[in-house]
Image (cartoon, rainbow, N blue to C red):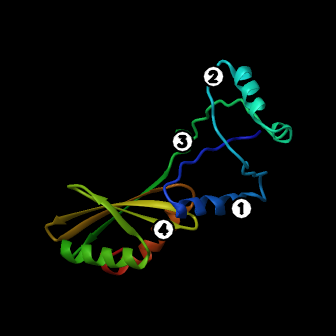
């Protein structure tokens, strides 16, 4: 079965990651990138549209037109992100814990992107995929409580969380 994907990427780096994925999948699937103009039209008068389209094309080009009837497939709701939570209790102050986390995140190419009253949000891009990390730090009577919430697809969540466990363990008492 053929599927048409329309991916509205944010930047050139994201496009390159998609190109890399397509190259990787060429061994398992027939992947082609349509040349020319690709568009989706929704109409009850498809024959009228096609006739006008063919009238605008050279005979050689009209023989290369491929048309597929589409029905949208909601994969987003069927493929749920993997989620993982790691919690630590440290004897260190919240400020010390925060600085240590910033150091470890920087070392692992984990970048900050937003925060709210209760948490800070980070992300990282690996060969296995993107992982979002939400960090909650709360002072407690005898130190600091830290909660890391990982979210992403495929193997990426497990990969990033294991890597961080190794780096965070010495200070946060894993």
- Determine contact: label 4, label 1, CB under 8 Å: no
Give the x, y percent position of residue 123.
41, 63
Front of the two marks 1 and 2:
2
Q: Earlier in the sequence, mark 3 or mark 1?
A: 1
Q: Earlier in the sequence, mark 4 or mark 3?
A: 3
- The residue indicated by pointer 2 is 43
Label 1 to label 2, Cα distance in Å? 34 Å
Q: Which residue is mark 4?
A: 160
Q: Earlier in the sequence, mark 4 or mark 2?
A: 2
Q: Residue at x 77, y 37 (%)?
A: 57
- Element marked by disc 2: loop
Name the mark nearer the viewer: 3 or 1: 1
| Looking at the image, residue 73 lies above or below residue 108 | above
Q: Point out the frontmost of discs 4 and 1.
A: 1
Residue bearing the label numbered 1: 23
Look at mark 3 in the image and give the residue it sits on: 76
Q: Earlier in the sequence, mark 2 or mark 3?
A: 2
* Picture residue at 31% right of the left edge, 79% below the top: 171
Task: Determine whether the residue tagged by mark 1 lies in a helix, strand or loop.
Answer: helix
Q: For marks 2 and 3, give the CA distance.
A: 25 Å
Quadrant in the picture for the C terminus: bottom left
How far, Cα to Cα, is label 4 from label 2? 46 Å
In depth, the one of 147 and 106 nearer the eye is 106
Q: Are marks 4 and 3 in contact (CB under 8 Å)?
A: no
Q: Quadrant of residue 76?
A: top right
Label 3 neighbour load within 10 Å: few <14, some 14-19, many 20+: few
Looking at the rendering, in which quadrant would you find the N terminus? top right
Report the Cα–Cα distance between label 4 and label 3: 22 Å
**Mark toward the start of the polypeptide (4 vs 1):** 1
């Amino acid at each position: 079965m053929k599927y048409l994907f329309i991916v509205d990427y944010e930047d050139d780096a994201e496009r390159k990651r998609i190109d890399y994925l397509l190259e990787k999948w060429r061994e398992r699937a027939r992947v082609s990138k349509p040349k020319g103009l690709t568009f989706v039209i929704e109409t009850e008068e498809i024959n009228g549209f096609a006739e006008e389209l063919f009238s605008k094309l050279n005979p050689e080009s009209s023989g290369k037109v491929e048309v597929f009837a589409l029905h949208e497939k909601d994969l987003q709701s069927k493929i749920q992100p993997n989620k993982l939570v790691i919690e630590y209790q440290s004897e260190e102050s919240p400020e010390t814990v925060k600085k240590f986390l910033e150091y470890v995140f920087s070392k692992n190419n984990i970048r900050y992107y937003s925060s709210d009253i209760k948490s800070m949000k980070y992300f990282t891009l690996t060969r296995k995929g993107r992982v979002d990390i939400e960090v909650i730090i709360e002072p407690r009577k005898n130190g600091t409580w830290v909660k890391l919430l990982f979210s992403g697809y495929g193997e990426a969540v497990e990969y990033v969380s294991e890597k961080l466990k190794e780096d965070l363990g010495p200070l946060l008492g894993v």
